[in-house]
């Protein structure tokens, strides 16, 4: 074979590299420079390099003599025979290392040799690159890998920047990304996340790849040389490194407890037990030794609005003192407050008599004012044993239509409860703040140094660390730096910005020292609001965010406020030009933990060093988790996806445990709570063989004795394909009662039991699932009988309701114990209001609470009843729900669709409509009921030529036909007409309604809205 050898003095650190430089397609003129680089680096770093262009080197015996194969600027099918390709495949499967540079990521062999692109790129392909060699910025994510640890956060260099048709993140470990805002990426731009260098372990071997290195000058660049050589050393096994941080199948989301009910906040004890609270007052403990959950105790709490038991944190010395801090709304309190108290947990039981009251925070209650929600309630310790408490401003704009989604600043006489300048903007009020205290062993607290106002300052509260928040619902404290990462919510309003203020914006803040974060005067990227008088309609000058003055007549604190700090991230409902990674939709930001990697932690499931110093951000409305990277100066560097292939159902709280695993609470799919898909989970970094997944279900989980229950393990699986063995413990006594996959057990004694399924794979790893069973008590059945789910209304209607409850043990139901909470549904969240007691009554749907006309609104009736329990059993709660839909629906607010897209158009009723309609496409709304009070349907649409029809169908796109409406010609895409009413066929009950489109041509018409008319 031909080729040049460059060898260094052999020593124990030396390794051999095959440098293959053949190109049979496009030949880069930088190949000689690349060869020179490898030769020089081999001499300097003490490894041997053998360069060749002869494909005959791909022989199994020959390849066995190399620790790594460096593929430099290859193009086309550089292997001439199937034997050569198989030799390469065998080399990788045998543990060999591959380094791929620039054009080797775009050889064009995906049809002939698809294995190669799958190995190197995770299946992605390069359709185009930037228009020429352009100077741009690469962002370095991995600061510990040998190929990147020497690089700056932002690496400026000239490059021909490759684009890829699919983002390989999740299949590869991303080391470096390209910042497309710093150069012209061309027509095939990838967007905000553009991996450019990565590595992975795959099919037994190691792969390191960079799409950089087009120019000959690259190979003289010191940083690029170190980048490639570091990757080569890792691939050859000469330098350690982890390449699984952003490879999603290397993680496991393990279910710990999927029998939660409205879980709020969690913490993990040093012994691995997981403590979490539920809004109805329970403190629960998951024990990893038994894989079961027990209730340590329950507080008597008020649960109107968003109140209840909402926050908890274990003392830093919990192992010694057993103290837990709880933030809750005490039921029956003489004053309207939320309370922060310390309790002791002894032998797994909450000692309620041990309560030490630390702090009471004012909170509106429905006995004095309509329940506003916005409680906040997160409790966190800092690294210096200071305790932080997040408190909402308690004055949301959705209590008065005058404020239309703006900051509520009602300075009229008698309207002080609608004035957030009285609370969040008031230096003498604890609401709308993050508070910071140092608890004492005796049960009180002192004020630490560094809070916003010195103790004794007139017109201030010394507990305030940061002010100017609407609802800092979730925050965390970096245990290394002491920085507070705090998310804040905004009012419900989309664009545009007006003379009264901005759209509703939310924030992610990094608080390095005490400060003011603006609300209710400024929000988002310090966009100001303006004073407003609803009586006169007068709008004042917007507030000066650098020189804030609180002129409210309800202000009891300082008039001159600290300057407003800028958040790291801000966004609204639509796509963000500044932060496109956050997406669009409902806005509910949550600040998760900052990971601190501990190399000495023996846990095999701890997150890798890649995440050291990274913050985890999660979105309650958008159901995702993100990784936030900060540069050496502490500024935001990059927002990355995390575990995007996993389902997150309204993530509620998360923290890292002492094992370095990530613990997570999920609220579940429905805002109103009582969700069957809520749960407690642990996310492990599980390189190698993973745990089997146990799934358990029961035919019945409550009822009178004898109670016969059929259990099934259907859905249990091993992610590695191993066979499973099964074991059931029906009564929780620690004895396995059955080894069948499916089993039956009869409970003859009354009591609360936990049936546990254990599944074990061939390696001995196990997974667990639990099912609570109550024998001797039956859960109440709660039904909102009228109005039926999906009933169509006009907002402003007074709707009578009737709730039916049946419970065999309670017998006749005391309707005073039946609770209905009406809520205004907006997008994918709800605004709960005051609890109403009784089985019958009337609700007024007229208060849209500041939500503008055209918003995606529903009216939701959430009903519940808690029974009295039975001898030897606990109380059980039943839930009922009915969603009332507006008769006039914007088409873009559909719940499902096929083939269409949302088109932004100024002439549409709400600025958007449904377009790209072709034959067979559809949109759907759910739930909907047209059984009573509906006679006909019309559509607002546009169609230049006309033709086709809209079919209204129930249950499926080919379901029962209720009405067919022909599409008229309107003459222009922006000329809208309301179609003639078409009578609906009678149909009782609740259904998913489909608007199915028949069209003579592609893109025949657009739909703006649909209206269901009374008979």
Image (cartoon, helix red, strand yellow):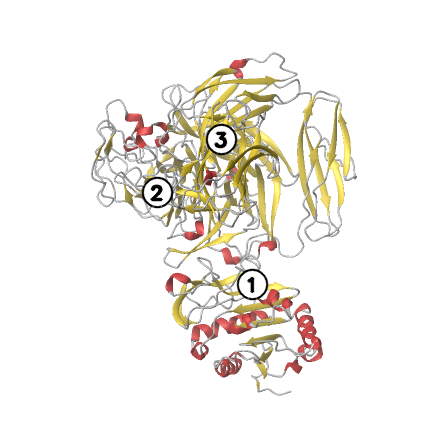
Q: Please report whichever mark, 1 or 2, sits nearer to the chain's N-terminal start.
A: 1
- 1006 left or right of 710? left
Residue 135 in percent (x, y) is at 38, 70
Q: Does the CB distance between marks 2 and 3 fall below 8 Å?
A: no
Q: From this view, report whether residue 288 is shown above or below residue 613.
A: above
Residue, disc 1: 124
Q: Nearer the viewer, residue 555 or 964?
A: 964
Q: Please report whichever mark, 2 or 3, sits nearer to the chain's N-terminal start.
A: 2
Q: CA distance from mark 2 to mark 3?
A: 30 Å
Q: Considering the image in quadrants, where does the N terminus appear? A: bottom right
- 1014 left or right of 364? right
Residue 762 in percent (x, y) is at 75, 51
Q: How many neighbours does mark 1 have within 10 angstroms: few (below 14), some (14-19), or many (20 or more)?
A: many
Residue, disc 2: 495
Q: Please report whichever mark, 3 or 1, sits nearer to the chain's N-terminal start.
A: 1
Q: Nearer the viewer, residue 632 or 792?
A: 792
Residue at x-position 50% and y-position 46%: 917
| Disc number lying in front (1 or 2) | 2
Q: Does the CB distance between marks 1 and 2 fall below 8 Å?
A: no
Q: Is residue 207 visible?
A: yes
Q: What secondary structure is found at the residue carrying circle 1?
A: loop
Residue 970 in percent (x, y) is at 41, 42
Residue 946 in percent (x, y) is at 47, 43
Q: From this view, report whether residue 313 is shown above or below residue 626.
A: above
Residue 499's disc number? none
Q: From this view, report whether residue 334 is shown above or below residue 349.
A: above
Q: What secondary structure is found at the residue carrying circle 2?
A: loop
Residue at x-position 64% and y-position 70%: 113
Residue 937's disc number? 3
Q: How many neighbours does mark 3 have within 10 angstroms: few (below 14), some (14-19), or many (20 or more)?
A: many
């Amino acid at each position: 074979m031909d080729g040049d050898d460059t060898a260094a003095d052999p020593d124990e650190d030396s390794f051999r590299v095959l440098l293959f430089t053949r190109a049979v397609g496009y030949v880069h003129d930088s190949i000689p420079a690349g060869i020179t680089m490898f030769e020089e680096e081999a001499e300097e770093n003490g490894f041997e390099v053998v360069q060749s262009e002869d494909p005959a080197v791909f022989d199994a015996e020959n390849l066995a003599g190399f620790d790594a194969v460096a593929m430099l600027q290859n193009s086309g099918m550089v292997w001439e025979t199937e034997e050569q390709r198989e030799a390469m495949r065998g080399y990788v499967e045998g543990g060999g290392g591959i380094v791929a540079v620039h054009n080797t990521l775009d050889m064009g062999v995906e049809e002939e040799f698809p294995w190669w692109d799958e190995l190197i790129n995770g299946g992605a392909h390069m359709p185009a690159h930037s228009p020429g060699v352009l100077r741009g910025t690469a962002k370095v994510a991995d600061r510990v890998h040998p190929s990147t640890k020497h690089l700056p956060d932002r690496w400026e260099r000239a490059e021909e920047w490759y684009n890829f048709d699919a983002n390989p993140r999740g299949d590869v470990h991303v080391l470096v990304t390209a910042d497309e805002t710093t150069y012209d990426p061309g027509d095939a731009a990838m967007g905000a996340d553009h991996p450019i260098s990565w590595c992975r372990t795959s099919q037994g071997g190691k792969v390191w790849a960079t799409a950089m290195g087009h120019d000959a000058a690259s190979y003289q660049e010191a940083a690029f040389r170190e980048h490639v050589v570091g990757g080569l050393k890792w691939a050859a096994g000469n330098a350690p490194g982890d390449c699984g941080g952003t490879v999603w199948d290397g993680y496991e989301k393990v279910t710990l407890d999927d029998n939660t009910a409205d879980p709020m906040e969690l913490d993990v004890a040093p012994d691995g037990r997981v403590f979490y609270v539920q809004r109805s007052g329970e403190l629960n403990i998951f024990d990893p030794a038994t894989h079961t959950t027990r209730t340590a105790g329950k507080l008597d709490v008020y649960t109107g609005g968003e109140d209840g038991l909402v926050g908890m944190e274990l003392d830093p010395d919990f192992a010694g003192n057993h103290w837990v801090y709880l933030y809750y709304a005490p039921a029956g309190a003489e004053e309207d407050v939320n309370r922060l108290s310390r309790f002791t947990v002894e032998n797994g039981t909450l000692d309620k008599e041990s309560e030490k009251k630390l702090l009471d925070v004012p909170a509106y209650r429905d006995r004095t004012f309509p329940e506003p929600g916005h409680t906040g309630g997160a409790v966190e310790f800092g690294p210096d044993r200071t305790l932080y408490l997040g408190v909402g401003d308690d004055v949301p704009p959705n209590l008065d239509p005058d404020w239309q989604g703006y900051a509520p600043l009602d300075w009229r006489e008698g309207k002080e409860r609608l004035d957030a300048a009285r609370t969040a903007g008031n230096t003498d009020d604890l609401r709308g703040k993050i508070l910071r205290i140092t608890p004492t062993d005796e049960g009180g607290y002192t004020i630490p140094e560094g809070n916003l106002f010195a103790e004794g300052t007139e017109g201030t509260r010394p507990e305030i660390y940061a002010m100017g928040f609407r609802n800092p619902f979730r925050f965390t404290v970096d245990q290394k730096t002491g920085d507070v990462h705090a998310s804040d919510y905004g009012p419900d309003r989309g664009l545009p910005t007006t003379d009264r203020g901005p759209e509703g914006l939310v924030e992610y803040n990094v608080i390095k020292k005490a400060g003011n974060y603006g609300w209710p005067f400024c929000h988002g990227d310090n966009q100001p609001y303006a004073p407003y008088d609803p009586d006169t309609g007068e709008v004042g000058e917007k507030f000066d965010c650098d020189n804030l003055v609180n002129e409210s007549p309800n202000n009891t604190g300082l008039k001159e406020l600290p300057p407003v700090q800028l958040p790291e991230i801000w966004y609204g409902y639509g796509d963000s030009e500044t932060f496109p990674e956050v997406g669009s939709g409902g806005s509910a930001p949550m600040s998760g933990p900052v990971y601190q990697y501990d190399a000495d932690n023996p846990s095999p499931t701890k997150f890798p060093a890649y995440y050291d110093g990274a913050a985890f951000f999660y979105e309650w409305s958008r159901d995702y988790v993100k990784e936030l990277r900060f540069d050496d100066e502490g500024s935001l560097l990059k927002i990355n996806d995390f575990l995007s292939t996993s389902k997150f159902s309204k993530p509620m709280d998360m923290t890292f445990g002492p094992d370095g695993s990530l613990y997570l609470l999920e609220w579940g799919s429905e805002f109103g709570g009582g969700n069957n898909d809520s749960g407690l989970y642990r996310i492990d970094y599980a390189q190698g063989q993973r745990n089997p997944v146990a799934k358990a279900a029961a035919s019945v989980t409550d009822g009178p004795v004898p109670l016969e229950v059929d259990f099934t393990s259907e859905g249990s699986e091993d992610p590695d394909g191993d066979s499973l063995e099964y074991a059931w413990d029906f009564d929780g006594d620690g004895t396995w009662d059955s080894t069948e996959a499916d089993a039956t057990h009869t409970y003859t004694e009354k009591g609360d039991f936990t049936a546990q399924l254990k599944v074990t794979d061939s390696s001995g790893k196990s997974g667990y699932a639990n099912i609570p069973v109550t024998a001797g008590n039956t859960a109440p059945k709660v039904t909102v009988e009228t109005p039926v789910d999906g009933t169509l209304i006009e907002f402003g209607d007074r709707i009578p309701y009737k709730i039916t409850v049946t419970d065999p043990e309670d017998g006749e139901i005391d309707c005073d114990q039946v609770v209905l909470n009406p809520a205004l549904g907006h997008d994918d969240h709800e605004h709960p209001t005051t609890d109403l007691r009784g089985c019958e009554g009337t609700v007024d749907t007229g208060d849209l609470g500041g939500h503008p006309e055209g918003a995606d609104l529903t009216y939701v009736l959430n009903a519940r009843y808690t029974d009295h329990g039975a001898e030897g059993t606990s109380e059980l709660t039943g839930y009922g729900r009915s969603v009332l839909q507006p008769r006039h629906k914007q088409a873009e607010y559909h719940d499902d669709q096929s083939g269409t897209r949302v088109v932004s158009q100024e002439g549409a009723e709400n600025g958007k409509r449904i377009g790209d309609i072709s034959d067979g496409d559809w949109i759907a709304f759910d739930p909907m009921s047209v059984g009573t009070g509906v006679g006909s349907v019309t559509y607002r649409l546009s169609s230049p030529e006309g033709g086709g029809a809209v079919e209204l169908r129930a249950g499926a796109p080919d379901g029962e036909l209720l009405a067919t409406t022909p599409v008229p010609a309107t003459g222009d895409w922006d000329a809208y007409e309301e179609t003639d009413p078409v009578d609906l066929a009678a149909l009782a009950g609740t259904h998913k309604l489909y608007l199915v489109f028949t069209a003579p041509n592609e893109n025949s018409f657009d739909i703006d809205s649909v209206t269901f008319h009374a008979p």
